[in-house]
Image (cartoon, rainbow, N blue to C red):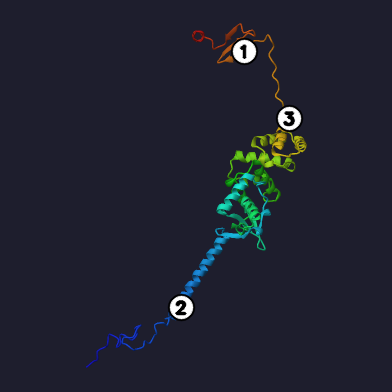
Amino acid sequence: MAKRKRLTPARPDYLADTPSSPGAKSMFPTDTPRSAPPVAQVAGATAAQAALEELSGELRAARAEGRLVQDLPLEAIEETYLVRDRMAADDTEMEALKESLKARGQQTPIEVVELENGRYGLISGWRRMTALRALAAETGEARFATVRAFLRQPQSASDAYVAMVEENEIRVGLSYYERARIVARAVEQGVYPDEAAALRGLFASASRAKRSKIGSFVSIYHALDDHLRFASAIPERLGLSIAKVLKEEPKRAGHLITALDAAASSTLDVEISALTKAISAAQPKPEKTSSPEPNTPLSEEIGGICLQLSRDASKLTLSGRGMSDGFYLDLCEWLKSRTA
């Protein structure tokens, strides 16, 4: 007779965590750690390594693409990496920025490019850098010794200059002189072949009229830059007048320089006043219109009717193709209404 196969273990309590009867000892003490099988350990380690490599790769990509904010030492930033477009910072605005940094910290990172030997070149954020340096010197606090920055990788020098100009145009607009100056300096640095290309490249989003005004101020930079102390404060209208004089009479540049040197340019108001007076003296005086002869009657033609008034205003004569019976009657009615 065939034996039955057992479908249940002979001792169900054999692998139990606790003994089934008093006094019996378990094969596995309760405090003995149970390790995972070797295959599971290998699989877990492989998954952890893959996750770590993926995270590291994402961080490297974010850093290279400029998506990762980094804290960099202030002394590692070279502000002269690019010729700066902004010539000076307004004292009131700078104090407001410093107060904001004290209260809330740096909210917007600057932009830098990585150089050699742990150095970084400043692309944009000059005002924030200046404020942080001032706060570090004034307070000595460690939180002002570093600056938050995005690492950029501009494809060319022109891309770096465009990034600097665009950031300043968005935040605090440059003066026309500062815009013109960076156009000329970018050409001097060999970033652009000529000033027309620099205007188109640096201010591509500006209107044609605005680019034309910037181009006008470029002539002021070339003629007067070494003699101006408050160039960025030159008003738009005065600057365009100066540019017009320099274009039409280049020799007038000498008169402007003499006026600036004579005024000593001690203050902004003195410098602007000297320029205004020099321009007024350079502009041609309007010709005086000769008065009509005493006996010459005044005359004017309107709608085909010639009106002629005697010099003593005692007689008005109307003549011409517009004269008609209807006009005469209308004129009479109008005169009656005026004298009623």
Query: Mark 1 Cα within 10 Å, few/some/many (few <14, many 20+)?
Result: few
Verify CB contact (< 8 Å) between mark 2 and mark 3.
Answer: no
Q: Position of residue 219 (x, y in %)?
A: 70, 40
Residue drawn at point x = 57 percent, y = 15 percent: 302
The residue wearing badge 3 is 281
Q: Amino acid at mark 2?
A: Gln
Q: Nearer the viewer, residue 308 or 138?
A: 138
* Element type at mark 2: helix
* Element type at mark 1: strand
Total number of numbered labels? 3
Verify CB contact (< 8 Å) between mark 3 and mark 1.
Answer: no
Residue drawn at point x = 64 percent, y = 7 percent: 312
Q: Nearer the viewer, residue 194 or 231?
A: 231
| Residue 158 in view (yes/no) | no
| Residue 305 in view (yes/no) | yes
322 sits to left or right of 284: left
Give how far apart the Cα atoms at labels 2 and 3 are.
91 Å
Query: Mark 3 Cα within 10 Å, few/some/many (few <14, many 20+)?
Result: few
Q: Amino acid at mark 1?
A: Ser
Residue sticking out furthest to the front: 139
The residue wearing badge 2 is 41
Q: Amino acid at mark 3?
A: Ala
Mark 3 or mark 1: name the one nearer the start of the chain. 3
* Element type at mark 3: helix
Q: Nearer the viewer, mark 3 or mark 1?
A: 3
130 sits to left or right of 8: right
Mark 2 or mark 3: name the one nearer the start of the chain. 2
Give how far apart the Cα atoms at labels 1 and 2 are.
112 Å
User: Which mark identifies residue 299?
Assistant: 1
Q: Position of residue 216 (x, y in %)?
A: 67, 39
Task: Indicate whether 276 appears above or below 193.
Answer: above
Task: Indicate whether 185 appears above or below 212.
Answer: below
